[in-house]
Image (cartoon, helix red, strand yellow):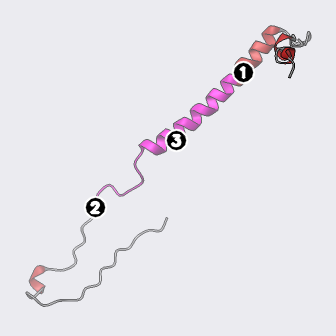
Amino acid sequence: MAPHSQGVLSDMPHPVDPSVSPERRRTLVLLVNSVVAVIGGALSGLLGVFALKPAAAPARDRWIRAGALSDLEPHVPVPRVLVVPRVDG
């Protein structure tokens, strides 16, 4: 590899389009950066809401009366079936 081949790209001037003014270019850069920042902020906000907000769970645990203790006899097993209705979704 020739020693002068590494510096060829950095020594060449970049072509400048005379029809595009520097102010227009700067405005376009600011516009694109602003749009990217707004999109990133919106996505970060959504992620933050779902990360910090607890899952939709019932506010309190509910106790359901399964039966009275007076109905039970000591050391005698009694079969019981408990059904707790739940909403799908």
Q: Mark 1 points at which residue?
A: 31
Q: Is residue 78 left or right of residue 41?
A: left
Q: Gap between marks 1 and 2, in whole Å?
A: 51 Å
Residue 61 % position (x, y): 28, 61
Q: Which residues are drawn in magenta?
A: 33-60
Among the two numbered marks 1 and 2 on one chain, the one whose residue lies closer to the N terminus: 1
Residue 3 % position (x, y): 84, 15
Q: Name the residue under label 2.
A: 61
Q: How dense is the environment of label 2, judged by Cα within 10 Å: few (below 14), some, or many (20 and up)? A: few
Please check the rendered image and state whether residue 56 is part of the magenta-colored stretch, yes or no: yes
Q: Mark 3 points at which residue?
A: 47
Say what secondary structure mark 1 lies in: helix
**Quarter of the image where the N terminus is located:** top right
Where, by quadrant of the figure, is residue 20 drawn? Answer: top right
Q: How dense is the environment of label 1, judged by Cα within 10 Å: few (below 14), some, or many (20 and up)? A: few
Say what secondary structure mark 3 lies in: helix
Residue type at tag 3? Leu
Q: Gap between marks 2 and 3, in whole Å?
A: 28 Å
Asked whether 20 or 2 is in front, the reply is 2
Number of numbered callouts drawn: 3
Labels 1, 2: front one: 1
Among the two numbered marks 3 and 1 on one chain, the one whose residue lies closer to the N terminus: 1
Asked whether 67 or 1 is in front, the reply is 1
State if disc 3 and disc 2 touch (CB < 8 Å). no
Residue type at tag 2? Asp
